[in-house]
Amino acid sequence: MLRATAILVLSCMSGVVLGREFMGHKVIDAPFVVAGGKTVVLPITDAGPIPAEDRKAKVEAAGFIITRSKDDSKIALIVWTFGLTNKSIKSIQSISVSEVAPADVEIPFVNDDAPQLQDKYWIGNTTPLAATRESVPWLFADGPSTFVFRITINEPANDSREYFQPAWFSSEAKAHFREMIARINGG
């Protein structure tokens, strides 16, 4: 099946933050107010977010794809996709992803109660949603859009790890995705 797909991801540049540079870009600490009013400070560059990581796991992807509906090839869908590498967690019981900014209230996106990792890599996707002005107004709005996602890895014995991952979509990238949507929808 013909599938128009694009991925705009935190294209998780496999680099290392050296000093206050990441892949040749100056790193700054940016505050984000997340659901519940808490402020988290996350490292970013002028080229985009830096992958959240620690010695146990690394976020590799936080973005979306635009694709055609399997039921009707003239309907564009948006699917959020997330990926992470397990560096050293022995047993993962579940992985969840929620939007925590710009939302005032946490919005669950993925809840994987039986995560399957392939070569230590996990991918989680949302249910496809029609890519319309009504369902994803931010994509059709002027200006860039920034999100923060909370990715929670639950281990046995109620241990959990949280990673806050920003994702930034420029005005130009959003315009490209709108063009893709229009082509798929026949307009």
Image (spheres, rainbow, N blue to C red):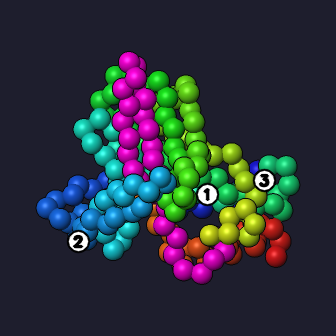
Classify residue 47 by image quadrant: bottom left
Q: Residue at x 46, y 61 (%)?
A: 167
Q: Residues within 10 Å of mark 1 (few under 14, many from 20)?
A: some
Which residue is the site of mark 2?
26
Image coordinates of residue 155 in percent, x first then y, are 40, 25
Of marks 3 and 2, which one's residue comes earlier in the chain?
2
Real-space CA distance between mark 1 and mark 2, rounded to the nearest whole angstrom: 28 Å
The answer to whether residue 12 shows anywhere in this view is no
Which residue is the site of mark 1?
65
Q: Secondary structure at mark 3?
A: loop
Which residue is the site of mark 3?
69
Direction from residue 65 to residue 119 in the image, left or right: left
Q: Is residue 108 above or below residue 156?
A: below
Q: Residue at x 34, y 50 (%)?
A: 52
Direction from residue 59 to residue 55 in the image, left or right: left
Image coordinates of residue 67 in percent, x first then y, are 70, 57
Provide the residue span drawn in magenta.
139-165
